[in-house]
């Protein structure tokens, strides 16, 4: 009898010893004369339980975790291959509250399948969206994406259908699909998780995008800090091509599409779409002035769709199940789901895919379990290092683009970094300026010089030097950066600074009545 075991190959799981655990399980099985089939799957996103090992049973997959090499022998003694009892037994994976309470659409297969198996992907609903797309006119595909309400999941939340429609209408012999996989925001990992756990979902989304707008070439611009994702994507692309899903004649449809992976060089600014395009062209990663928009003149001057990983990976389910199915999730103009990523001082860090509309309070407590330190969570930074700090009194806000924007917050890429009441918010405000100094491309003065002056002003404020006057100077400087910067790097750096000043004045040496 053969037993099927799942051990994650996700970067987070591997950093916690998953490779060593997998080797120990294989060794123990051999010693016990047991035949096993080991699948190296992606992570389910319960990072505090990694490495989480799953065993396939007649009732479903049963999870154990977090498993260390020292636990493996006792697991075999407890007959865990037959779902035996053990202190690390977590029960049926799908029944675990953290997973059961989610709405996994884009991440439905992550942690479930063998990431590089074309057939495994297909058995679990893969390629259905592409097969449907091949029966439709390009305009109908674009209309479906528009009707779904899908907006860019990379931060700007621009409607994907409008961007696709612009590229579809553009007249050019060559068009491109570019996937922005330069996931550089602190506390974000959803792109990496998907590329390592379900790369075909991204590939399928890119192919559908190419068919929709008339593009025949796609590029995945991947940050160099993701070597495992790079290797997984290369294998998946080769397997997809061998199976006829990429190439000159996709599934004998007469449609052509190719995908290449290109590595970045560690620049945060290349997460900005025009800087990314410059880098793809072999130039220094600097922001372009807009207009023209990339949808009109993008890569090599040709019409280009630039979407991030989760945006493109959301497309297959829309084409497979219909625009209405996807649009039925969410609230207001925020339709579908978003992969929220819990990080920082949080007890249960990991990935939570939920429909828009749940509150930060529910996300932090029901899923995150509160702070790791046990102290009250004082604030969370949502949307990466350029996102504003949301104070505890605003945790009731629904996670919705418009609801957040109304309060001058942003959801961005869905990263949520928690801080307990020991954090010094003036120090965090200074860090925001320091981050901009480090990562600015240097093309425009407000960002290049403003961030340097911002660090200096923050240091004077924190040292108590002429505090009131320097705070006014800081506010003026932030106004200049917001309104004068060429891109979001300089234009949004003031958001965490001003939110810290507004909601935590005491940390700047001000009275509560001095809120700005």
Image: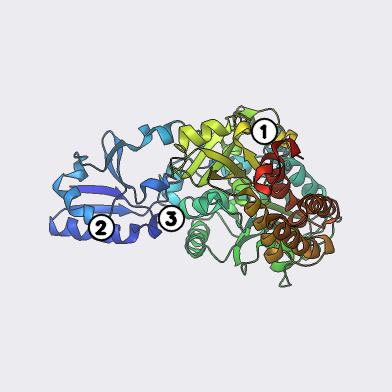
Residue 346 seen by the camera: yes
Reading the image, the residue beneath label 2 is 69
Q: Is residue 61 left or right of residue 196?
A: left
Place of residue 193 in the rendered image (x, y in percent of width and height, measured from the top left) = 49, 51
Place of residue 458 in the rendered image (x, y in percent of width and height, measured from the top left) = 72, 57
Circles 1, 2 touching at the beta carbon (< 8 Å): no
Reading the image, the residue beneath label 1 is 334
Earlier in the chain: of badge 1 and badge 2, it is 2
Q: Is 436 located above or below residue 351 in the figure? A: below
- Split into 4 quadrants, where in the image is the C terminus? top right
Query: What distance separates the C-alpha of mark 3 from that of mark 1?
Result: 30 Å
- Secondary structure under the numbered disc 3 in the rendered image: helix
Q: Nearer the viewer, residue 2 or 453?
A: 453
- Residue 416 occupies quadrant: top right
Circles 3, 2 touching at the beta carbon (< 8 Å): no
Place of residue 251 in the rendered image (x, y in percent of width and height, measured from the top left) = 56, 51
Earlier in the chain: of badge 3 and badge 1, it is 3
Q: Nearer the viewer, mark 1 or mark 2?
A: 2
Question: Which disc, if any, is residue 12?
Answer: 3
Query: What distance separates the C-alpha of mark 1 from that of mark 2?
Result: 44 Å
Q: Is residue 14 left or right of residue 256?
A: left
Q: Is residue 281 left or right of residue 380?
A: right
């Amino acid at each position: 009898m053969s037993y099927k075991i799942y051990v994650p190959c996700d970067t987070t799981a591997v950093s916690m010893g998953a490779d060593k655990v997998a080797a120990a399980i294989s060794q123990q099985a051999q010693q016990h004369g047991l035949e096993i089939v080991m699948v190296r799957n992606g992570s389910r996103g319960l990072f505090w339980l990694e490495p989480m090992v799953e065993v396939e049973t007649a009732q479903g997959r049963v999870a154990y975790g977090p498993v260390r090499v020292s636990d493996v022998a006792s697991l075999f003694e407890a007959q865990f291959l037959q779902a035996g009892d053990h202190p690390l037994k977590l029960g049926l994976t799908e029944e675990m509250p953290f997973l059961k309470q989610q709405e996994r659409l884009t991440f439905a297969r992550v942690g479930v399948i063998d990431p590089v198996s074309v057939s495994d992907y297909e058995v679990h609903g893969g390629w259905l969206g592409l097969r449907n797309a091949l029966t439709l006119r390009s305009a109908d595909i674009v209309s479906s994406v528009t009707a779904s309400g899908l907006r860019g999941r990379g931060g700007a939340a621009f409607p994907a259908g409008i961007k696709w429609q612009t590229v579809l209408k553009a007249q050019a012999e060559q068009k491109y699909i570019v996937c922005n996989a330069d996931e550089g925001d602190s506390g974000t990992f959803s792109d990496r998780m998907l590329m390592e756990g379900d790369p075909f979902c991204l590939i399928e989304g890119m192919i559908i995008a190419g068919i929709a707008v008339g593009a025949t070439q796609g590029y995945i611009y991947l940050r160099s800090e993701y070597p495992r994702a790079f290797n997984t994507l290369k294998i998946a692309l080769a397997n997809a091509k061998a199976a006829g899903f990429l190439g000159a004649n996709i599934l004998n449809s007469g449609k052509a599409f190719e995908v290449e992976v290109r590595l970045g060089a560690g620049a945060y600014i290349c997460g900005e779409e025009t800087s990314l395009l410059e880098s793809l062209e072999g130039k220094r990663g600097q922001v372009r002035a807009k207009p023209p928009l990339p949808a009109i003149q993008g890569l090599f001057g040709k019409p280009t769709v630039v979407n991030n990983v989760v945006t493109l990976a959301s497309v297959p389910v829309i084409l497979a199940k219909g625009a209405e199915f996807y649009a039925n999730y969410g609230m207001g103009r925020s339709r579908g789901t978003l992969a929220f990523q819990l990080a920082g001082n949080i007890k249960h860090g990991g990935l939570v895919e939920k429909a828009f509309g749940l509150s930060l309070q529910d996300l932090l407590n029901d899923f995150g379990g509160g702070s790791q330190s046990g102290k009250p969570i004082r604030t969370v930074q949502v949307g990466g290092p350029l996102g504003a700090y949301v104070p505890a009194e605003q945790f009731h806000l629904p996670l919705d683009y418009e609801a957040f924007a109304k309060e001058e917050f942003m959801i961005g890429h869905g990263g949520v970094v928690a801080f307990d009441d020991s954090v010094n918010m003036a120090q965090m405000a200074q860090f925001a300026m320091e981050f901009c100094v480090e990562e600015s491309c240097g093309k425009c003065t407000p960002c290049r010089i403003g961030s340097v002056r911002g660090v200096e002003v923050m240091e004077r404020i924190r040292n108590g030097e002429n505090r009131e006057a320097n705070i006014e100077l800081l506010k003026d400087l932030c106004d200049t950066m917001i309104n004068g910067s060429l891109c979001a790097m300089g234009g949004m750096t003031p958001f965490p600074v001003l939110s810290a000043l507004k909601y935590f004045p005491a940390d700047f040496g001000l009275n509560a009545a001095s809120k700005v």
